[in-house]
Amino acid sequence: MNTLIHIEPKQLRRAADLQETILKLQDELTEILGAPETPAEAPEPRKKYKFSAAARAKMRKAQKERWAKIKGETVTEAPAKAAKKGKRNISAALRKARSERMKAMWAARRMGKVAKTAPAKAVKKGKRKFSAAARAAMAAAAKARWAKAKAAGRKSL
């Protein structure tokens, strides 16, 4: 086995000559094909995710709490921020009126009175009917096929 340590000078020179030959051939190929000499540009780096100020504040607070727990200290709270707006409250009368309207709308839909939600009825096609002569011709053709198959020694078409 020939390792890198045991390479003779002749072998090293031969390897260097081969390397030069390969580089020359690659240059010729580039000239012939007109391929760019520089490698393709790297794709754009992925966008970094941005956190909102509120999210960063929550993460900061949680990290401080984790470190305080490890060190056995207590966390001092930051000054309170302005209170968030609460949910909008609607009056009981308005809530009841909306509920009644929705009940009426769904009742109308169930009854099929609302055109946009009523499904269109598909026209059902009747069963195909063949005349007696057509049925007799099909039966004769089937008998002929079976007779031919049986004559050939087969048990199926």
Image (cartoon, rainbow, N blue to C red):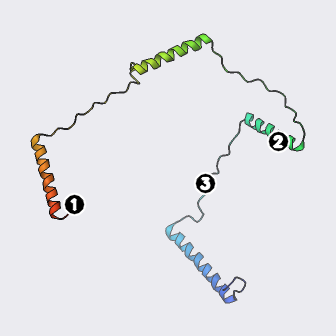
Q: Mark 1: give few (<14), some (14-19) or many (20+) Cα within 10 Å.
A: few
Residue underneath mark 2: 66
Counting labels gives 3
Q: Residue at x 79, y 26 (%)?
A: 81
Q: Are marks 2 and 1 in contact (CB under 8 Å)?
A: no
Q: Position of residue 65 (x, y in %)?
A: 83, 39
Q: Quadrant of the C terminus?
A: bottom left
Q: Residue at x 90, y 39 (%)?
A: 73
Residue, far top: 93
Q: Amino acid at mark 2?
A: Arg
Label number found at residue 43: 3
Q: Is residue 113 above or below residue 143?
A: above
Residue type pointed to by label 3: Pro
User: Which is more N-terminal, label 3 or label 2?
Assistant: 3
Question: Which circle marks residue 155 in the picture?
Answer: 1
Residue 96 % position (x, y): 57, 13
Q: Earlier in the sequence, mark 3 or mark 1?
A: 3
Q: Nearer the viewer, mark 2 or mark 3?
A: 2
Q: In this image, 28 relative to 144: left or right?
A: right
Mark 3 nearby-residue class (10 Å; few <14, some 14–19, many ≥20): few
| Mark number displayed over residue 131 | none
Residue drawn at 12 percent across, 44 percent down: 134
Q: Which amino acid type is marked by label 1?
A: Lys
